[in-house]
């Protein structure tokens, strides 16, 4: 059974106005896409379709959890995703992507597959750096053993001898200035 067929909206028979659709994104959804960063999850997707004469506006609302890898400790955890997106679909001669949120489809089309848009929106909602959330006290919920091992393996800063020489020059300059001020103060007395 093709799981993604449930994400096809047949719009040709719908009247002008608003129509609502509910979709459940589960593991089978992600399995349908090769090389998906996400493999497991449960996300509810509400879609409000505003159908007009020459275009349609799809407003997506996402709420759910997906399994991700923590960039800090490398362990999997369920990450809460929530957000909204909008897709404008206009009718024209040929299929064309006008911008990231506007496409043109042939006026002879009678349906649209929303699965690839939902897939893309879910991935775009992920932050660039994914880490375990903090607890109520503001402490990380990452695996403490992994964090301890990482701290032990972290390279220790190596001082560059050129910077050390610069520090010596700065100290000598400071001493010279102090001595000059002392000498000037003695002359004034």
Image (tube, helix red, strand yellow):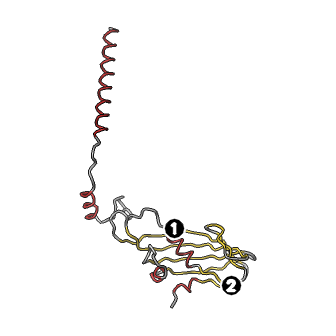
- Horizontal side of 176 relative to 41 (left or right) equals left
Task: Name the residue rendered at 62%, 79% in the picture.
Answer: 20
Q: Are marks 2 and 1 in contact (CB under 8 Å)?
A: no
Residue sitting at x 31%, y 30%: 169
- Sort mark 2 into few (<14), some (14-19) or many (20+) by Cα contacts within 10 Å: few
User: x, y percentage for residue 135?
Assistant: 36, 63
Q: Nearer the viewer, residue 140 or 76?
A: 76
Front-most of 9 and 116?
A: 116
Against 160, residue 91 (above or below) is: below
Q: Which mark is residue 68?
A: none
- Residue 139 coordinates in the image, percent (x, y): 34, 59
What residue do we see at 58% from left, 69% from top? 85
What quarter of the picture does the C terminus occupy?
top left
Quarter of the image holding residue 88?
bottom right
Give me the C-alpha separation between circle 2 and circle 1.
Answer: 28 Å
Q: Residue furthest bottom?
A: 1
- Callout 1: few (<14), some (14-19), or many (20+) C-alpha neighbours within 10 Å? few
**What secondary structure is marked by label 1?**
helix
Please name the residue that numbered disc 2 is placed on.
Answer: 110
Q: Secondary structure at mark 2?
A: loop
Is residue 187 something one can see in this rendering?
Answer: yes
Q: Quadrant of residue 66?
A: bottom left
x%, y% of residue 52? 73, 76
Q: Residue furthest front?
A: 162
Residue 77 point in image, percent of width and height = 37, 71
Please tell me which of labels 2 and 1 falls first in the chain: 2
Image-based side of 141 in relation to 42, left or right:
left
User: Badge 1 is on which residue?
Assistant: 124
Please say whether residue 135 is visible from this viewpoint. no
In the image, taking residue 46 as reference, residue 55 lies left or right, namely right
Classify 160 as above or below 34. Answer: above
């Amino acid at each position: 059974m093709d799981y993604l067929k449930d994400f096809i909206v047949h719009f040709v028979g719908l009247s002008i106005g608003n129509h609502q659709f509910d979709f459940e994104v589960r593991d089978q959804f992600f399995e349908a896409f090769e090389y998906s960063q996400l493999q497991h999850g449960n996300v509810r997707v509400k879609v409000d379709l505003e159908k007009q004469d020459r275009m349609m506006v799809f407003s997506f609302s996402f709420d759910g959890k997906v399994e991700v890898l923590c960039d800090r400790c490398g362990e999997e955890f369920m990450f809460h995703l929530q957000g909204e997106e909008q897709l404008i679909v206009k009718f024209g001669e040929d299929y064309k992507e006008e911008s990231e949120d506007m496409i043109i489809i042939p006026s002879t089309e009678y349906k649209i597959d929303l699965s690839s848009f939902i897939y893309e929106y879910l991935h775009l909602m992920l932050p660039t750096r994914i880490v375990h959330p903090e607890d109520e006290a503001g402490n990380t919920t990452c695996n403490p053993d992994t964090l301890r091992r990482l701290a032990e393996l972290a390279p220790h800063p190596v001082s560059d001898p050129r910077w050390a020489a610069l520090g010596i020059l700065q100290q000598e300059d400071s001493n010279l200035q102090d001595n000059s001020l002392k000498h000037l103060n003695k002359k004034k007395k």
